[in-house]
Image (cartoon, rainbow, N blue to C red):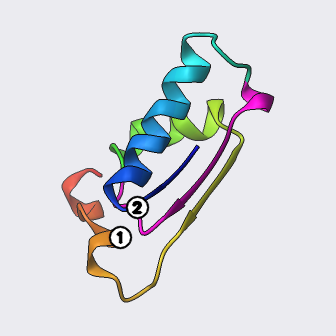
Amino acid sequence: FTGHSLGGSLAALSAFETVLTGIRETNQVKVVTLAEPRTGNMVFAKNFDRHVKYSFRIINGIDVLAHLPPCHKDY
C-alpha cells in the first residue's frame, strides 16, 4: 500500500483493515507513505505497529501537515 498526504492515511487504514479482516497475513502487507499526516491516536498507532510490521512513513521535518494533528491532543 502506498499513498501521499491524505492518500497515505488511507493506505495505512486500508493495510490495517486488510490484516485485521484476514484478507492478508501480517507478513504479506507493506506500507510506504509520503507526507502522511498522523493517522489515529496513540492506541491506534500501537495496534497498527503490532499488526503491520513493514511500514515506512517518509516526511519532511518542516512539513507542517505531517505533524498534524498535534501529539498533545492525544494523537
Rendering coords of residue 30 (x, y %): 69, 42
Badge 2 marks a residue whose secondary structure is: loop
Nearer to us in this view, 32 or 68: 32
Asked whether residue 63 is drawn in magenta, I would say no
Q: Is residue 27 magenta?
A: yes
Q: Nearer the viewer, residue 72 or 45?
A: 45
Q: Which residue in the protein does label 2 denote? A: 36
Residue 64's quadrant in the figure?
Answer: bottom left
Dot 1 surroundings within 10 Å: few (below 14), some, or many (20 or more)? many
Q: Earlier in the sequence, mark 2 or mark 1?
A: 2
Question: Residue at (43%, 35%) from the top-left corner?
Answer: 13
- The reply to whether discs 2 and 1 touch (Cβ–Cβ < 8 Å) is yes
At horizontal 63% and vertical 13% (from top left) the residue drawn is 23
Q: Residue furthest right?
A: 27
The residue labelled by disc 1 is 66
Span of residues in magenta: 26-38
Mark 2 → mark 1, Cα distance in angstroms: 6 Å
Choose between 1 and 69: the one closer to the eye: 1
**Residue 3: which disc?**
none
Q: Quadrant of residue 40?
A: top left
Whether residue 61 is situated above or below residue 56 in the rendered picture: below
x then y, percent, for residue 39: 36, 48
Q: Amino acid at mark 2?
A: Glu
